[in-house]
């Protein structure tokens, strides 16, 4: 396997990981009656989540959502489980506190 093939495979795996995380986030938002306005994958900054409590199989996003009443919420969402990553449908959200 040459270097180019390795980079292409690595990029495909990463993009699949992000896409699957966004899919889980969208499913969760529908169940919670929220509309996701924006979601940004967090590479380094994992917000309020512990580095030791987050596995590489999980995806963390910075999100902005609007609820049914029209209230705007911002926070961090962690998708997937610790051991099985994105194969679990778990989504944990920590909303920013209002001043």
Image (cartoon, rainbow, N blue to C red):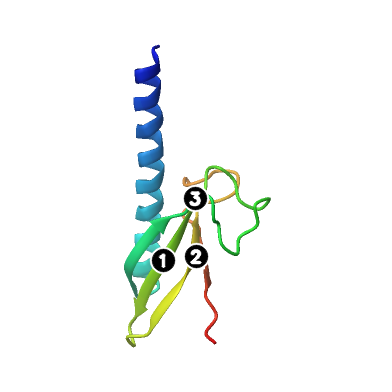
User: Which numbered disc, 1 or 3, marks the residue closer to the eye?
Assistant: 1
Q: Earlier in the sequence, mark 1 or mark 3?
A: 1
Provide the residue designation for mark 1. Answer: 63
Between 94 and 2, the residue placed more toward the observer is 2
Image coords of residue 32 (percent x, y): 40, 73
Q: Residue furthest top?
A: 1
Q: Residue furthest right?
A: 52
Provide the residue designation for mark 2. Answer: 76
Residue at screen point 34% across, 26% down: 8
User: Which numbered disc, 3 or 2, marks the residue closer to the eye?
Assistant: 2
Residue at screen point 52% across, 48% down: 58
How far apart in space, not on screen, are marks 3 and 2 (Cα)? 18 Å
How far apart in space, not on screen, are marks 1 and 2 (Cα)? 6 Å
60 up-or-down from 57: above or below: below
The answer to whether marks 3 and 2 mark residues whose Cβ atoms lie closer than 8 Å is no
Residue at screen point 47% across, 47% down: 86
Check disc 1 and report its element: helix, strand or loop: strand
Residue at screen point 35% across, 33% down: 12
Q: Earlier in the sequence, mark 3 or mark 2?
A: 2
Image coords of residue 69 (percent x, y): 34, 88
Binning the other alpha carbons within 10 Å of mark 2 as few (below 14), some (14 to 19) or many (20 upward) gives many
The answer to whether marks 1 and 2 mark residues whose Cβ atoms lie closer than 8 Å is yes
Binning the other alpha carbons within 10 Å of mark 3 as few (below 14), some (14 to 19) or many (20 upward) gives some
The quarter of the rendered structure image containing the C terminus is bottom right
Binning the other alpha carbons within 10 Å of mark 1 as few (below 14), some (14 to 19) or many (20 upward) gives many
Provide the residue designation for mark 3. Answer: 88
Check disc 2 and report its element: helix, strand or loop: strand
5 up-or-down from 78: above or below: above
Image coords of residue 88 (percent x, y): 49, 50
How far apart in space, not on screen, are marks 1 and 3 (Cα)? 20 Å
Between 75 and 22, the residue placed more toward the observer is 75
Check disc 3 and report its element: helix, strand or loop: loop
């Amino acid at each position: 396997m040459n270097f180019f093939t390795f980079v292409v495979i690595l990029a495909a795996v990463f993009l699949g990981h992000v896409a699957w995380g966004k899919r889980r986030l969208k499913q969760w938002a529908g169940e919670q009656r929220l509309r996701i306005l924006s979601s940004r994958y967090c590479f380094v900054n994992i917000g309020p989540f512990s580095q030791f409590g987050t596995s590489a199989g999980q995806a963390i996003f910075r999100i902005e959502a609007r609820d049914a009443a029209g209230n705007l919420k911002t926070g961090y969402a962690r998708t997937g489980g610790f051991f099985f990553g994105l194969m679990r449908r778990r989504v944990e959200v920590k909303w920013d506190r209002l001043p």
